[in-house]
């Protein structure tokens, strides 16, 4: 994790604390450092774990982690968002090695994740699917379609991580986890900055689809 | 008698048993036609956005999803999912609709989708099949299930009395000198009747695959006539293929007449499909009138 600020700065310039404000950075780091069974050598392995970044907006943290873990070359961070850079403000899976989906428009990743998780099961694979959404992104109705379908069809190899920085316009009375629990998901809440807690929570056993709400400070 | 929908269901059910790559994703409509006990058959309830998203995920996991619903709910409601979850993810799928432009007009505007092919035409890389007979559905669908590309197949209750061999390009059914009429899918019988009725000396081309557009086939047909006059008759939104014809014939002066479901009005009529054909001048009388005026002189 020590090199993340340096990698971040290659995209954003020399602002020292910007990386730390990224709501997703700690969850992404723990996922790629300790949880996901995927490496640069296994990005095409049918049995890999799949991580789908649904909240594709503000992908610097994602690119920095992919670079640090060797999925993409560090040098491509420098020219990001330029004409022929593979890295844009929203990731494109065709251009970025290791990116499982192209995202940017909100509310697409979770329904796709239900499909990849079902696909892994059909293939008899040990692979799991993890999808990261934002609390604001949950406004999109397509997520709620997928939340219902995943639980009803018992898609237990699916984990949804909701990074909650309280950016949803009207909020989620009763808490985000309840939205999943009422549909039949196993749920947990965790401090989205506490690496040990994130690891323990993400690796807890579950026999149903699993929603982890990672709480971080309110966005400004 | 077998309908196009029955031919589709039977073909998919035959192939799903034989090919472990094939999956079916539905949103209630027609779901009872597919073996729900098969883990590759997924019904998501009345949730069309997730229907397309799940199909995308299955394709990303290496499966060949068949996605099916009534045309407005397959194409128009989840249009952004088709654009992003299928096209932008660069995966393949086979989308099969029923209902067409107005197969069940008593259900009103909510169940009419004359814009479906035009919408797919805004997205790169889609093959679009518009079969005109149940027997044409089977070979087109079998090929689509084998491939890895993006396919839209538009099924209808409107059909021609007999099938024609399906291929990638247009089929020439009649040779003439005054110009070319391109009939798409279920419009063929009416086009032939209208041409016969007007005794028009025109070449008639038949298309069951309208994208990719067979530019070479059209260009050759036009070269064999005395006038570069092309009428295209489509069972969906008028003008959907006129840009393809203009592009094909850009090197020569030419005339184009585009016929299809009219764009001008929000029709608030029920009735029968034949009533709607008349309203859009897509019956033999209307088509005959168009043939007569366009190929005059």
Image (cartoon, coloured by chain):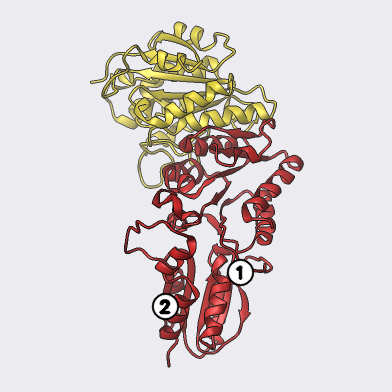
Q: Position of residue B151 (x, y in %)?
A: 57, 52
Q: Secondary structure at mark 1?
A: loop
Q: Is residue B140 above or below residue B55?
A: below
Write down the quadrant of residue B203 in the picture.
bottom right
Where A169 sits versus B64, above or below? Answer: above
Left-right relation of B24 to A195: right
Q: Which residue shows up at 62% across the image and 23% down it?
A: A127
Residue B32 in the figure: left or right of residue B235: right
Residue at the image position 56 percent from the left and 32 percent from the top: A115
Residue B37 in the image: x percent, y percent?
69, 30
Residue B50 vs residue B275, the one in the foreground: B275
Chain with colour yellow in the figure: A
- The residue tagged 1 is B169
Q: Residues within 10 Å of mark 1 (few under 14, many from 20)?
A: many
Mark 2 highlights which residue? B256
In the rendered structure, which disc, 2 or 1, sits on the residue that comes first in sequence? 1
- A63 or B27, which is in the foreground? B27
- Among all residues in the image, which is located at the extreme bottom? B297
User: From where the camera sits, is residue B216 visible?
Assistant: no
Residue drawn at x 51%, y 47% as measured from the top left: B70
| Residue A116 position in % (x across, y down) | 57, 31
Which chain's colour is red? B
Q: Which mark is residue A193?
A: none
Q: Chain of mark 1?
A: B
**Which quarter of the picture shows residue A16?**
top left
Q: Tell me the subunit letter for badge 2.
A: B
Q: Could you give the CA–CA distance between mark 2 and mark 1, rounded to whole angstroms?
A: 20 Å
Residue B190 x, y percent position in the rendering: 54, 73
């Amino acid at each position: 994790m020590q090199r993340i600020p340096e990698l971040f700065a290659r995209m954003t310039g020399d602002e020292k604390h910007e990386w730390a404000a990224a709501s997703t950075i700690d969850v992404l780091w723990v996922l790629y450092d300790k949880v996901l069974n995927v490496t640069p050598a296994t990005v095409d392995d049918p049995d890999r774990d799949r991580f789908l970044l649904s909240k594709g907006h503000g992908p610097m943290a994602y690119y920095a982690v992919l670079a640090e873990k060797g999925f993409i070359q560090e040098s491509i961070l420098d020219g990001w968002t330029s004409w022929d850079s593979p890295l844009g403000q929203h990731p494109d899976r065709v251009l970025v090695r290791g990116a499982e989906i192209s995202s940017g428009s909100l509310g697409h990743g979770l329904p796709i994740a239900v499909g990849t998780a079902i696909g892994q099961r059909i293939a008899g694979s040990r692979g799991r699917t993890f999808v990261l959404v934002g609390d604001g992104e949950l406004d999109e109705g397509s997520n709620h379609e997928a939340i219902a379908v995943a639980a009803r069809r018992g898609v237990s190899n699916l984990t949804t991580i909701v990074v909650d920085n309280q950016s949803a316009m009207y909020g989620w009375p009763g808490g985000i986890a309840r939205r999943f629990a009422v549909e039949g998901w196993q749920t947990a809440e965790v401090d989205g900055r506490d690496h040990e807690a994130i690891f323990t929570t993400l690796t807890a056993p579950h026999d149903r689809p699993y929603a982890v709400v990672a709480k971080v400070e309110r966005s400004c | 008698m077998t309908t196009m929908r029955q031919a589709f269901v039977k073909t998919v059910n035959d192939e799903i048993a034989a090919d472990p790559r094939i999956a079916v994703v539905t949103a209630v409509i027609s779901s009872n036609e597919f073996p729900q006990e098969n883990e590759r058959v997924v019904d998501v309830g009345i949730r069309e956005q997730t229907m397309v998203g799940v199909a995308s995920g299955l394709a990303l996991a290496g499966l060949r999803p068949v996605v099916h619903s009534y045309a407005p709910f397959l194409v128009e409601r989840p249009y952004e999912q088709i654009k992003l979850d299928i096209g932008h993810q660069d995966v393949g799928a086979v989308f099969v609709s029923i209902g067409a432009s107005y197969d069940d007009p008593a259900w009103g505007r909510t169940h009419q989708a004359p814009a479906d092919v035009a919408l797919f035409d805004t997205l790169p890389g889609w093959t679009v099949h518009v079969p005109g007979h149940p027997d044409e559905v089977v070979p087109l669908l079998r090929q689509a299930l084998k491939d890895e590309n993006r396919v839209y197949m538009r099924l209808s209750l409107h059909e021609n009395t007999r099938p024609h061999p399906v291929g990638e390009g247009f089929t020439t059914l009649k040779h003439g000198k005054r110009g070319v009429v391109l009939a798409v899918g279920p419009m063929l019988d009416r086009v032939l009747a209208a041409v016969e009725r007007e005794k028009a000396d025109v070449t008639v081309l038949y298309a069951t695959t309208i994208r990719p557009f067979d530019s070479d086939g059209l260009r050759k047909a036009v070269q064999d006539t005395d006038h570069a006059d092309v009428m295209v008759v489509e069972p969906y939104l008028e003008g959907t293929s006129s840009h393809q014809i203009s592009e094909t014939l850009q090197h020569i002066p030419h005339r184009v007449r585009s016929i299809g479901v009219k764009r001008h009005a929000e029709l608030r009529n029920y009735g029968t499909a034949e009533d709607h054909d008349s309203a859009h001048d897509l019956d033999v009388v209307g088509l005959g009138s168009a043939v007569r005026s366009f190929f005059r002189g």
